[in-house]
């Protein structure tokens, strides 16, 4: 895994190291240039000084008058020599170094004894005077000063690296604290991570983690509530089943036994319906990953659902029709959309027996719409917001023993998974009920 500390250290120390090399090289060249300037002037002054000395003592007969050196001169010293104009050597300051005779004024760089020398020659009054220095001498001095600068830079790099590690560890310490906090809390605790002294850069991470914890908490709570409600709802039909079973046991004759058996059977039907509804609720939970999305033709969907309800509609003397006003295709999970439409049609047949029930498919301003309308009692205005709550049953539903109060909550959950809205309205003329599922406009769908 990538480490912030290692990355920063690598980059910053690396950049400083490259900088150190560049500075050292530059320092060497600048110093050498400076040395040339200073020592070239020096050599000239010294050579002129030697020439002037000879001129002052014209009848001076050469080396005899100048005491010869007895010590071995330093390698780094500037050496001097003088000659007559004819090339007879008059004086040599270091007997180890005999520079070649030159009668041209100015600087030259001869090789003497395998070493490069920098020589300044002066011609005055019939004398030739020379002052010279080893080139390596200047290079060595420039090298020494560059080495000093470089060692200081290396110290600086080490100090910056150490400071970087220190400040990063200090800055990231709150993260360790937060990790420890999460590690030690109980699995049930969804309390937010304290922001504490966390650096600004970590705030978005902590904030979004807290937001996730909050949503997890909400969904845990919703699940627990649903489980409690479901258990409560299941108790009623099971109690009824037990009663019916006792009746059956006690039936004195064949006919009453038959009646009890039929009641028991419809009781089992109701329980099964409830269990199926509960299962649908569980499946309509908003985990979008489990959706198998494909293009769904709403007209085909309407026809297949209508076909499945044909017998039930006949039994309730309902004229169940499909009316395709526009062709409409949506991206969705065909199984879930079938469950949605089943619930709407089931309600219409249940609460509006005897009248016509229509499934309409249309486009409303580029929004695909599927709508189920009936001529029944409708849902009174004050109940309209609550009918989508789980286990809520309205006035029209309270007479029906088979209801669970889950149908419309399933409809809404599935619609939300499909980014669709559920709208309650009236059939034309202000009668009955029409439930419209309005999908996202076609262009919006294509982008997803
Ligand atoms: N087509 C309809 N006509 C009249 N009332 C309806 C219709 N559909 C639903 N309702 C009302 O909304 C309530 C909630 O519906 P639903 O969630 O399907 O539960 P259930 O049908 O099991 O009672 C019903 O109890 C009923 O009062
Ligand atoms: Mg229902």
Image: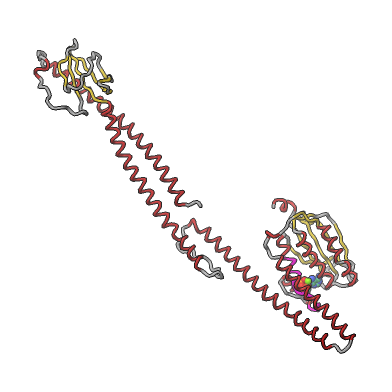
237 shown above or below 444: below
- Magenta stretch encompasses residue 407: yes
Q: Nearer the viewer, residue 291 or 314?
A: 291
Where is residue 288? Give x, y as percent: 68, 60
**Residue plotted at (31% across, 37% down):** 147
Where is residue 13? Give x, y as percent: 41, 45
Name the image quarter holding residue 99: top left
Q: Nearer the viewer, residue 100 or 12?
A: 100
| Residue that extends furthest to the top in the rendered view of this protein | 86
**Residue plotted at (78% across, 75% down):** 403
Q: Is residue 194 left or right of residue 100?
A: right
Q: Is residue 103 left or right of residue 166?
A: left
**Residue plotted at (19% across, 15% down):** 128
Q: Is residue 330 left or right of residue 223?
A: right
Where is residue 145? Give x, y as percent: 29, 36
413 shown above or below 67: below
Q: Nearer the viewer, residue 122 or 355?
A: 122
Name the image quarter holding residue 365: bottom right
Where is residue 409? Give x, y as percent: 73, 69
- Magenta stretch encompasses residue 289: no
Q: Is residue 213 visible?
A: yes
Figure colour scheme? secondary structure
Q: Which residues are magenta?
A: 398-412
Q: Is residue 194 left or right of residue 143?
A: right
């Amino acid at each position: 895994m990538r480490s912030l500390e290692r990355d920063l250290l690598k980059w910053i120390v690396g950049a400083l190291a490259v900088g150190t090399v560049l500075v050292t090289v530059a320092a060497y060249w600048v110093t050498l240039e400076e040395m040339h300037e200073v020592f070239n002037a020096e050599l000239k002054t010294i050579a002129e000084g030697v020439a002037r000395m000879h001129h002052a003592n014209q009848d001076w007969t050469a080396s005899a008058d100048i005491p010869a050196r007895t010590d071995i001169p330093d390698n780094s010293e500037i050496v001097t020599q003088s000659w007559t104009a004819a090339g007879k050597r008059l004086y040599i300051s270091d007997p180890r170094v005999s520079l070649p005779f030159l009668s041209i004024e100015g600087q030259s760089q001869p090789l003497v004894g395998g070493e490069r020398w920098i020589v300044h020659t002066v011609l005055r009054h019939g004398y030739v005077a020379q002052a010279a220095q080893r080139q390596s001498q200047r290079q060595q001095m420039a090298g020494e000063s560059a080495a000093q600068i470089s060692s200081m830079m290396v110290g600086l790099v080490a100090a910056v690296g150490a400071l970087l590690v220190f400040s990063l560890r200090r800055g990231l310490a709150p993260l360790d604290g937060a990790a420890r906090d999460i590690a030690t809390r109980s699995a049930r605790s969804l309390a937010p991570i304290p922001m504490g002294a966390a650096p600004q850069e970590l705030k978005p991470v902590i904030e979004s983690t807290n937001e996730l914890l909050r949503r997890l908490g909400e969904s845990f709570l919703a699940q627990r509530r649903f489980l409690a409600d479901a258990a409560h709802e299941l108790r009623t039909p099971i109690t009824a089943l037990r009663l019916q079973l006792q009746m059956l046991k006690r039936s004195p004759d064949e006919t009453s036994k038959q009646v009890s058996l039929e009641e028991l059977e419809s009781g089992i039907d109701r329980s099964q319906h409830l269990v199926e509804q509960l299962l649908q609720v569980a499946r309509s939970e908003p985990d979008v990953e489990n959706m198998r999305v494909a293009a769904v033709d709403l007209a085909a969907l309407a026809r297949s659902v209508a076909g499945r309800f044909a017998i039930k509609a006949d039994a309730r003397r309902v004229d169940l029709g499909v009316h395709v006003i526009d062709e409409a295709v949506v991206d969705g999970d065909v199984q879930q959309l079938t469950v949605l439409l089943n619930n709407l049609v089931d309600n219409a047949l249940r609460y509006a027996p005897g009248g016509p029930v229509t499934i309409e498919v249309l486009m409303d301003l580029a929004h695909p719409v599927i709508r189920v309308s009936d001529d029944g009692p409708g849902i009174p205005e004050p109940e309209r917001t609550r009918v989508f709550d789980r286990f809520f049953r309205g006035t029209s539903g309270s007479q029906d023993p088979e209801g669970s109060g889950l149908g419309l909550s399933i409809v809404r959950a599935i619609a939300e998974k499909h980014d669709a809205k559920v709208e309650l309205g009236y059939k034309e003329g202000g009668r009955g009920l029409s439930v419209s599922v309005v999908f996202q406009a076609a262009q919006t769908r294509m982008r997803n």
